[in-house]
Amino acid sequence: MSATHVAAAQGGGQMPGAPGESLKAFRSPGRGPWKGASEEEWNNWRWHLQHRVTTLAQLERLLPSLSAEERAGTQLAGSKLSLAITPYFFNLIDPDDERCPIRLQVIPRLEETIVAPRETTDPCHEEAHSPVPGLVHRYPDRVLMLVTDRCAAYCRYCTRSRLVSNASGYGFHPDVDRQLDYIARNPQVRDVLLSGGDPLLLSDHRLETLLGRLRAIPHVELLRIGTRIPIFLPQRITPELCAMLRRYHPLFLSLHSNHPRELTIEVREALGRLADAGIPMGNQTVLLRDVNDSAEIMKAHLQKLLLCRVRPYYLYQCDLIAGSAHLRTSVRRGLEIMETLQGHTSGYALPTYAIDVPGGGGKVPVSPEYILSRDKNRVVLRNYEGSVFEYPEAMDGPPPVKAPPPA
Ligand code: SF4
């Protein structure tokens, strides 16, 4: 740990250095109100699940600055998407800032009850692409397998809020045997993404059983796990879990992280354990109003992910999930952020900005325009500084220049 990081871990305030440096400092949230927890308890992921903040009474006690909108939102959360926050993640909340980017993501607000035009409970039409319960087959060669409806904490903008936490009475009953049978009968499926809910909430044994059964299907090449557990509950990333996961390579992990403050010392260590187990990791970020819709915050987050050995993968426009308008940012803003990043940071830090288009059309990449014109002879491009360049178009078909005959 560097001197800077030690200072940050000890609760130092603004860090010195270039703009963005403070955002990129690795801190530990500490125990906060749970300072009575023993070292063993604090490092035990099941202890965190048992001690989650799930009620209004707990919130009022722990967060005296709770606003009327948050109080009302929390009272109504039980019939929409449950409230749950792990003690570890709760300690990242700034108690004095109602617009704290961590707080906005996990504390319900009254605005969630307002359904804007075109918002729905299933904006990606997953139900329409579900041949067996809990399995979504929307792209030719890959499937999404929903293995649980539980998460360590609940994100207020969750695309699957219709089913996760079961607050709205969805009654999620994945039929694993039928899911596996479907995959086995469809040889074009070479890539299986486990998601939910969060698959890393399953016990090591249950997860290993599932991975083992998938690996036994010869045409399944790639296994992926979509998870926010390393962010909400880094204690879950135990050496035993990593040792188990490494037996099922190639296995990739799709992390979900949205703000540089989420990347703490604990998270960096947990992600390091996964990386040391040879697990390639990509991150998915959701673009959220007042959370990360700023070029400075986004750049710090993407660069910090690389420091955690995670490659930024997707930046998602927030789906049209019912009650999420207050968290959505314009596509125009997303494009501006991408424009600000291009050329100004490592290519490895640049995610693909994508919209999961309403109506079940799947992910569509969107990007600022860099091709100004194109015909059969040339492509005219602009670079990140606005300078214009021309690239001569190559001819398709056989090479135009013949090699001389050998002497
Ligand atoms: S962790 Fe993922 S599945 Fe769970 S609430 Fe958040 S976005 Fe939804």
Image: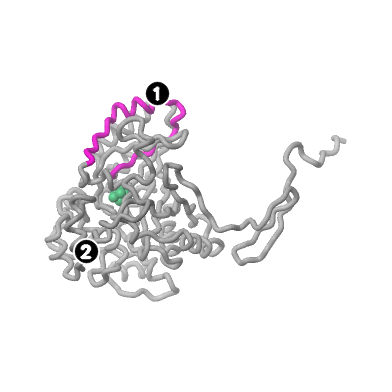
Measured Cα–Cα span from mark 1 to mark 2:
48 Å
In the picture, the quarter occupied by the C terminus is: top right
Residue ID for mark 1: 185
Q: Which mark is residue 18?
A: none
Residue type marked 2 = Glu
Camera-nearest residue between 117 and 222:
117
Secondary structure category for the residue under label 2: helix
Q: Residue 190, image x and y in percent? A: 45, 32
Identify which residue is drawn at 42% across, 75% down. 17
Give the quadrant of residue 216. Answer: top left
Residue 187 location (% of width, % of height): 44, 26
Mark 2 residue's CB less than 8 Å from ligand 1: no
Against 388, residue 213 (above or below) is above
Where are the magenta residues, as a range? 170-197
Q: Which of 91 and 43 is in front in this view?
A: 91
Which of 398/7 is in front?
Answer: 398
Examine the rendering and report whether any part of residue 333 can be seen.
Answer: yes
Three-letter amino acid code at disc 1?
A: Arg
Query: Farthest residue in the top direction?
Result: 185
* Magenta stretch encompasses residue 6: no
| Position of residue 320 in the picture relative to residue 345 (left or right) | left
Mark 1 falls on what kind of element?
Answer: helix
Q: Mark 2 points at which residue?
A: 70
**N-term-proximal mark, 1 vs 2:** 2
Q: Residue at x 54, y 64 (%)?
A: 344
Name the foreground residue: 8 vs 216: 216
Q: In this rendering, is residue 313 above or below 337?
A: above
Q: Is residue 138 above or below residue 258?
A: above
Task: State the image coordinates of residue 131 (x, y, percent, origin top left).
Answer: 36, 30
**15 in relation to 166, above or below:** below
Asked whether 172 falls inside the magenta stretch, the response is yes
Residue 230 visible, this angle: no
